[in-house]
Amino acid sequence: NALREMFVVITNSLHKLDGGTAPLAVLNAFLVKTLRVLGYAPSFGACSACAKASPLVLQEGGSLFWDSAHAQLVCSDCAQSAGLRSAVNELPTEIILLALELQSRPFKELDAASRDPGAHLALYRLLKGFMHQQIPAIHSGGGMKSLRVIDDSELVEGLETPLPLPVVSLDPEPSVLR
């Protein structure tokens, strides 16, 4: 039941914060797990067009792109065949691997997924953008006040991310992704 799952996510998040786990790592785990419970989980596990597993794409030397307009991950081969604009940057591998870890690991293993704060900041920004675009109540309601509080807090203030967060959009031509 979703209410029980949310209770578990919230209590585990609070337990990890109380135990000293990095707040941004806990926030990202909370967001990823909450989006899953609510049925809005972004998929970082495979290309949305060809279903090739993300780790396999990366292992073969390929790149992955985040199509923010459709909230989906696209491999370099599918991005090229779909006519993505040539001046886009790939989604950094570190963000993809962090998102996959947070989606698959239980809270008790969260410390193992605690990476560079810059990677957590980049993932937070990606998840925030995803929520604003994909969840109607957030999109039409002017955003989530709690995320604005977080943006203005010490949690993200002063953190710089060496990992760019590209905004990838599709050409107006029809494509396999639409």
Image (cartoon, grey):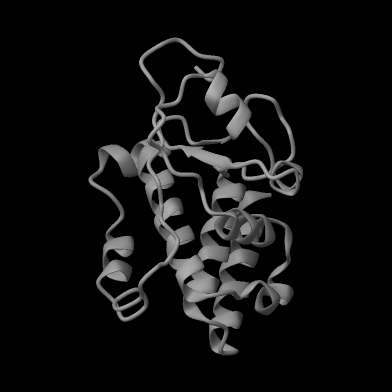
Q: Position of residue 35 (x, y in %)?
A: 54, 49
User: Does residue 35 appear to the left or right of 163 in the view shown?
Assistant: right
Q: Among all residues in the image, which is located at the extreme top?
A: 174
Instruction: Locate residue 158: give its quadrant.
Output: bottom left
What residue is rendered at 38% in x and 48% in y? 129
Q: How many marks?
A: 0
Quadrant of res 136: top left
Q: Which quarter of the figure has residue 81?
A: top right
- Left or right: 53 with respect to 87? right
Percent from the top left, x then y, of residue 171? 38, 20
Instruction: Please determine whether, in this image, residue 88 is positioned above or below residue 34.
Output: above
Q: Is 49 on the left-hand or right-hand side of 137?
A: right
Q: Residue at x 58, y 41 (%)?
A: 64
State the image coordinates of residue 1 (x, y, percent, origin top left).
68, 49
> In this rendering, is residue 87 above or below 151?
above
Which residue is depicted at the point 45% across and 10% down? Answer: 174
Asked whether, in this view, residue 104 is left or right of residue 124, the answer is right
Name the residue nearer the viewer: 1 or 126.
126
Taking 22 as reference, is 32 above or below it?
A: above
Q: Residue at x 42, y 37 (%)?
A: 68
**In this picture, is 12 found above or below 92?**
below
In front of the other: 26 or 1: 26
Q: Position of residue 66 (x, y in %)?
A: 49, 40
